[in-house]
Image (tube, rainbow, N blue to C red):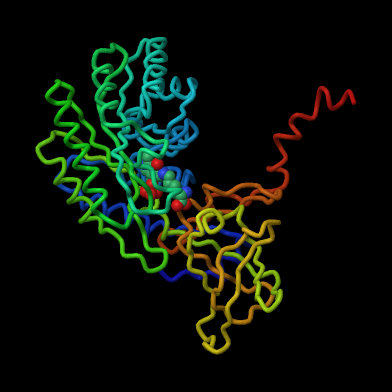
Amino acid sequence: MNIDFSALAQKYNTPLYLYDFDYIAKRYQELKEAFSGQKSLISYAVKANSNIFVIRHLAQMGAGADCVSIGEVRRALAAGVKRYKIIFSGVGKRDEEIREALQSDILMLNLESEAEMKRVELVAKELGKEARISIRVNPNIDPKTHPYISTGLHENKFGVEIDVAKRMYIYAKKSPHLNPVGVHFHIGSQLTELDPIKEACGIVADLVRNLKALEIEIKFFDVGGGLGVTYESETTISAEAYADVVIEAARGLDVTLLCEPGRYLTANAGYLLTKVLYEKGNGGRRFVIVDAAMNDLIRPSLYDAYHKIEVADSADTKKEEMTAADIVGPVCESGDFFGKNVMLPPLGHDALVVIYSAGAYGFSMSSNYNTRGRAAEVALVNGEDHLIRKREQFEDIVALELACESGWQRSK
Ligand code: LLP
């Protein structure tokens, strides 16, 4: 897609997030197609990009939602995701969240410990309900990704060991308030190798077979998310290869194949536009200071993640004019950078810079650090641009503080 970055920056100002909705649709269809002929459900991992319009776009194509807080469940429902396609995961659900999820009658709660199972049973009992549950298994497999986004090893806080899972299923089967319908695992994010996924699928499929022998019928085989994308030059797993591995592992089991992609659907649909404020040199090092910062996109600071950076309208730039620069934001931290040693032409005030692959874990991880308002978000649909989140203003940031302007403050 040819995007007129300059016109959009002019119209909406910067920092600005842009999402190519047609690309998201293409990715969703690709994955859905790969599972064709199977009972399957793609529940979008809302955490990757939680904008209601993004979720709605996917829901309109039939996607479900994978949520990790009741806030995300509410977003999914508000966006029109069918309640029977919503999963609620996470290691630390509060009683209120469990209650609301059960009352909302979503597809299932994904449990991550025995203690949590007892809590869910108790809340379901209070409500006179039977909670549909899945159990997150930790298959102890190294996904070969960044340690911060690796989740399927025993050293990580996620899921339970196979033996514990088995015990939990047996308990749940006997409980009048629990209905074990699913099994789940998620070994990590930004996975670019198929073997760890294959291995995990095998281990978990064996568990499902064992459970069948105990007359515990698992209906949903949830392989989590994690499909990697190309940020720089990574070779990634194709939708077909991924689906084939899952289909093969679950052969003979009468289950719905469920996956929870986040990044795969939205990462490369997103662009963060930012304008140059100043250039400066420090001891021979070149710094380009832009108007976006780590509060807008924290991935480089947090994971040392690579994002391709280019200057918009720089097609005529000669190679010899380019020099290495660090692209940094205005936040008061040395970790506030988007790229180091990036080759860039000389840049004047207001030159427009495009940060690529920013559609997943970009805006959704943004904050108000340094009392900076969050960026605006725009959807690009079929050649048209639509504002899907207004730029945050100072008044929005302080509203909840000013709402407390009564009581003890006044008596002072
Ligand atoms: N399902 C579960 C249970 C998850 O924990 C996650 C991500 C997903 C699905 C979606 O994973 P994806 O398909 O997007 O890889 N902030 C990090 C990523 C953290 C991922 C956490 N869990 C980043 O910016 O790379």
Task: Tell me which residue sits at (63%, 81%) in the image.
Answer: 346
Q: Which residue is at the far front?
A: 155
Residue 361 locus on image (x, y percent): 48, 51
127 vs 136: above or below: above
Q: Quadrant of the C terminus?
A: top right
292 vs 49: above or below: below
Pick the residue in front: 7 or 111. 111
Q: Quadrant of the N terminus?
A: bottom left
360 vs 179: above or below: below
Residue 120 locus on image (x, y percent): 39, 19
Q: Is residue 156 left or right of residue 227?
A: right
Pick the residue in front: 296 or 396. 296
- Residue 262 visible in the shown view: no
Task: Tell me which residue sits at (33%, 50%) in the image.
Answer: 143
Q: Which residue is at the far right?
A: 412
Pick the residue in front: 206 or 72. 206
Q: Is residue 253 left or right of residue 327?
A: left
Q: Is residue 148 left or right of residue 239?
A: right
Residue 105 locus on image (x, y percent): 36, 24
Determine which quarter of the picture holds residue 326.
Answer: bottom right
Residue 86 locus on image (x, y percent): 36, 34
Task: Tell me which residue sits at (20%, 46%) in the image.
Answer: 246
